[in-house]
Each structure stands twice: as C-alpha cells, then as structure tokens.
Image (cartoon, rainbow, N blue to C red):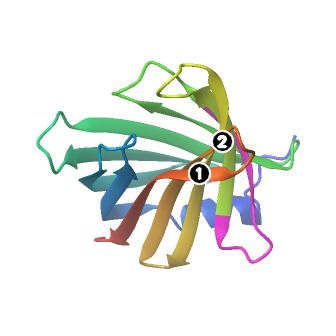
Amino acid sequence: MNNEPQSEHRWLAKLVGEWEGKGEAEGPAGEGTSTWRSRQSVRAIGELWIQCEASNEMDDGSSPSTMLITLGYDPAQGRYVGNFVGSMMSSQWIYSGSVDAGGRSLTLDTRGPDWSTGELRDYQDIIDIVDDNEHVLRSRMLGDDGQWQQIMQVRYRRVS
C-alpha cells in the first residue's frame, strides 16, 4: 500500500486555506434564485486528506447551514474519494472522481435523492481551480433527458 503523497494529493492541497464566497441556486419553477454568503475553511489532514467545512448564511434570512467535505486520493483505485454531509439533509454523499486533463477541474461523481421526488439520481460536484486565490464549487444533477442540469454554484476567494 502506497501512503506517500502523490501529485493528486498535492492538487488537493491547493484548496487549503480560508475562503469567502457567494453562492446561488435556481429554485423550483417559479421560485426564483436563492443566494447566500459562504465561509469555507479547508485544512489538511496529514499529507493525504483535506477536510472542508463551509458555513452558509442565506440572503433571505432562512436558517444557516454547515457542510463538511472530506477528500483524498486512493492510488489503489486511481480515483479521488471522499464524502459530503450537510446540516440541512439526512443523506451522506459518497464521492469518487478524477481531475480533467488540464489539471483545473475535479469532478466528483455521487448519487443521492432528488429534492422533489426523493428518488435516487446521479449528481456531480465539481471543483474548478481558477487560480491560487479563487475556486468555484458547482453541483449538477443528471436529468430525465440525460442532460446535466446545474443546481448550484459558489465562487470562493481566498482570505488567508
């Protein structure tokens, strides 16, 4: 078993730091767009894992939420692995993903419940590294028509 840090672990280390962001999500038909402010703290767990904690405050004054993401790279699988939990839901989301050929975008595949129907669907959380001081987290869901539909996005800027 190889427990030495790989280039993939160093890719994740780019996210370590304190970040502030603005997020938005399109609501169900007729409900408009939700917006929020987000604070993200990403710390290293040794050289092989990172843990992201995000705290969101909705612009409409609704209850704040907290999310935790743990990510690493498993050389045996050749995949990034991890999980996501949030204070606003009872589901745990299990990740498996890869970085694109350009080295800028990590796509994490997962399955979880559709907010409207409760039936399981395919989702992707995507982390796009813009530069050393900015990254974007996007989530999308695979629709019945076989097309990916973006459901939310947060643009983060480094504060330290």
Picture quadrant of residue 160: bottom left
- At horizontal 75% and vertical 45% (from top left) the residue drawn is 146
Could you say where residue 149 lies in the image, as x and y percent from the top left?
59, 51
Q: Residues within 10 Å of mark 2 (few under 14, many from 20)?
A: some
Q: On screen, 50 above or below 116? A: below
Q: On screen, 112 above or below 69? A: above
**Part of the protein shown in magenta:** 94-105
Q: Residues within 10 Å of mark 1 (few under 14, many from 20)?
A: some
- SS label for mark 2: loop
Q: Amino acid at mark 2?
A: Gly
Q: How far is the residue under mark 1 from the one under mark 2?
A: 7 Å
Q: Identify the residue position indicated by label 1 in the image.
A: 149
Q: Is residue 88 left or right of residue 51?
A: left
Q: Amino acid at mark 1?
A: Gln
User: On the rendered image, what quadrant is the N terminus found in?
Assistant: top right
Q: Identify the residue position indicated by label 2 in the image.
A: 143
User: Pointers 1 and 2 in contact (CB under 8 A)?
Assistant: yes
Q: Earlier in the sequence, mark 1 or mark 2?
A: 2
Could you say where residue 19 lies in the image, as x and y percent from the top left?
33, 63
Instruction: Residue lying at the far left in this picture: please name it.
Output: 61
Does the magenta segment cover residue 100?
A: yes
